[in-house]
Amino acid sequence: MSTQQILGVVGGVVGAYFGYPQLGFVAGSIVGGLLTPGEKTKGPRIDDLKVQVSTYGAGVPILYGTDRIGGNVVWSTNKIEIEETTGGKGGGPENTTYRYYVHMGIVLCETPRDGSEVSIVEIFKDGKLIYDARSGISVGSALESEENPHAYFVLYQGHADQLPDPGEEAWMGGPGSVPAYRGVVRIRMNAIECPSGRVPQFSFVLSANATSTPKYVLFDEEIPVGFEDTGVGRPVFYASGESDVLRIGAFTANSHTQVNSTWKFGIDGVAYGVEQRRAEDLWPVDLGGPFAAGTFRGFSVRCTRGAPLSAYAAITWYANETDTTASGSLSGLFPSDEFLYGLMISPDGGRLMVFTSTTDPTGQITKWYEIVDFLEVSRQGTVSPSLAQGRLGYGASIVNTDHIGVISNDGLTAWVADSANAQKWEIQGDNFSASGASVPFTAQDVYAQAITLVSNRVYVVGANRLACILPRVEYTVEPVKIKDIIADQCERADESRFDVSAIPDTDVLHGYKLQNPASARSNVDPLLTAFTAYIVDEDGLIKFNKYEDIASEATIPYDELGQAEDGAVNRPGFCGGSTL
């Protein structure tokens, strides 16, 4: 028994003498807790990481069409142990648990020889589908979750200009420490969580001949409320904390007063009704300059458009949404010789993007910065091609500007809208640029609009209309011709004397994978068997023909196929017999 338990029992006995055993037990336990250090417990730890199998000398798979591939691990870190401690305050028990992660690179298949690219259509983790390219979600965020926001994929095509992965170089000692893996398609996986030290098993549906076309499922309909610059007021989307609910608030005329009503909608646009605004439904009251931009890390953010970032009022934050005196400024985090030309905040309020110009206030947006706390810039890059001031908006709700914008919670994509169009933007490397064409919707009030992202859907509300844009990707996978596979294998064997013209174009496969490529003959043998084809050396050419095309050399009457000799009796079952 611990000292705390022993003194609790003693206190109970003493208390019983005076008629208060419970009070005595409590008093004894408190004294024991003060005299006894807090108990500490630790969860299980592992000594070795059970890394996914990596086979030396394995062949690089050759992919034709579309097929599922497991891949071969060619690079991996050791286990990355993260210690998490809870409790321990006030003499209470302290509990320590351990989580394990690993970074690794997997070779998937050979880079197409024609310079084309291989697409990832689906990703499976321990047999469970975790990514489908047709959902519109970028492959980089396929692993990300609220518990593990640092997990991501990077797909390398392995062309002649392929560079080494910078993360691998950082782990292995700097530039030149790892190969670029040219000639193979490879996926780099970051921060893969390993339950009980076991690396999950991944497999990938790849396509060497898929074409993707962005599609947008859009509903665009009237709603039973009309947001406007006067009357009901300008709309704002509150962070509902629910994946299937939209909560829309409003400001009165001139946006100086927040409305205490919240309009609630389902993600399918169905109106649920009007509710009283909750305490967590936050949005800064607009001061008409600086203008309200949104809520970041629980604080209200306002900005002065086009202001030099050397000015305190360029980007300011406030403890409360109705405060008129700033608690601090974010301007000091950015170069003082640049100008504020745009600003976005993620729907969860955890990420803020600032867009600037390096010239005077008549210049163009050329740079971007990201912050996830109030201390420093976490990422930065360029905007190319450059954009006009305000083209990316100054927040997710319009106040006397033509555009509104919102950055996704993971910081990988953004959406920008005006009164009748919305467009997706992406951060690739360090460059921020448009991705795809604009998606039109019914015109809304340019001075009464708001935008948000919920469950990979984009919502734009204005006047009495609500539009929803659900990004999708339509994949068209063409079948691969057998004759093309055979021709490619012959060319790889440096054999030009072949003829595949007898193989019809209708002999096709969805996909064909050579897991461990061997000789050209061994590689094509399964195809010849499946499609009843054969090889013949004729006229100096290696010809691939179909058995069904063989012409008969002679015709033998049926009766002459078998005949009984003189004196013999025809037996049933023999040619010429009476029963045949």
Image (cartoon, helix red, strand yellow):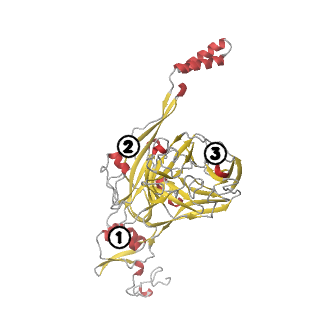
Judged by depth in the image, the label closer to the viewer, 2 or 3, is 3
SS category of the residue bearing label 3: loop
Judged by depth in the image, the label closer to the viewer, 3 or 1, is 3
Q: Are marks 2 and 1 in contact (CB under 8 Å)?
A: no
The residue that mark 3 highlights is 281
Q: Disc number at residue 78?
A: 2
Of mark 3 and mark 1, the one earlier in the sequence is 3
Whether residue 194 is visible, yes or no, is no
User: Residue 314's x, y, as percent?
Assistant: 51, 47
Q: Amino acid at mark 2?
A: Asn
Whether residue 505 is visible, yes or no, is yes
Whole-angstrom CA distance, mark 3 to mark 1, is 62 Å
Q: Say whether residue 565 is left or right of residue 281.
A: left
Q: Quadrant of residue 114?
A: bottom left
236 or 92, nearer to the observer: 236
SS category of the residue bearing label 2: loop
Whole-angstrom CA distance, mark 2 to mark 3, is 44 Å
User: Residue 250's x, y, as percent?
Assistant: 66, 51
The residue that mark 1 highlights is 488
